[in-house]
């Protein structure tokens, strides 16, 4: 069993900052790519940012220059620093990870999500 648990969401005014964390635990041998996706009300889930185990990063155009993704491989944790938040960033943010278990079973997993609300 492997779990992804997000934290750090909340209510913030436009222009403010939040830092999301996603901790992975359980039967983990290695985590390859990790990422953050978001889903606003009435919209499909979309990519915010991803980071590979080697540190290659990809951002959605809508968050470039404002969001920073990072990871701590020793802690199996990925972070999303969100600055200059806008009301359109309001969404449930989901953590995603490509996990290889100790018995070499590959899984793509999602967390339950954390709500970010940006007020104008």
Image (tube, rainbow, N blue to C red):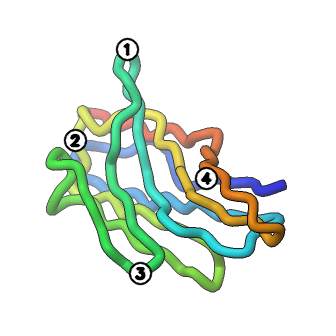
Name which of mark 4 and mark 3 comes first in the sequence: 4
In the picture, residue 12 is in which quadrant? top left
Q: Where is residue 17 in the image (x, y as percent from the top left)?
A: 33, 58
Residue that badge 1 annotates:
42
Residue that badge 2 annotates:
86
In the picture, residue 47 is in which quadrant? top left
Compared across the picture, whether 76 is left or right of 9 comes to: right
Compared across the picture, whether 25 is left or right of 33 comes to: right
Name which of mark 3 and mark 1 comes first in the sequence: 1
**Residue neighbourhood size for the residue with mark 4, other residues' Cα within 10 Å, grouped as few (<14), some (14–19), many (≥20):** many
Disc 3 element: loop
Measure the C-alpha gap from mark 2 to mark 3.
30 Å
Residue that badge 3 annotates:
54
Q: Position of residue 13 (x, y in %)?
A: 30, 43
Residue that badge 4 annotates:
6
Measure the C-alpha gap from mark 2 to mark 1.
18 Å
Residue mark closest to the camera, 4 vs 2:
4
Residue depicted at 65% across the width and 74% down the height? 30
Name which of mark 2 and mark 1 comes first in the sequence: 1
Measure the C-alpha gap from mark 3 to mark 1.
34 Å
């Amino acid at each position: 069993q492997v779990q992804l648990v997000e934290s750090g969401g909340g209510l913030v005014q436009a222009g403010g900052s939040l830092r999301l964390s996603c901790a992975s635990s359980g039967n983990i041998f290695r985590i390859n790519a990790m990422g953050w996706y978001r889903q606003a009300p009435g919209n499909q889930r979309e990519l915010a940012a991803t980071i590979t185990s080697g540190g290659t990063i990809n951002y959605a155009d809508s968050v470039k220059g404002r969001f920073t993704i990072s990871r701590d491989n020793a802690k199996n944790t990925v972070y999303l620093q969100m600055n200059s938040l806008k009301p359109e960033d309001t969404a449930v943010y989901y953590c995603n990870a490509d996990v290889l278990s100790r018995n070499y079973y590959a899984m793509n997993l999602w967390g339950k999500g954390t709500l970010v609300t940006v007020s104008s």
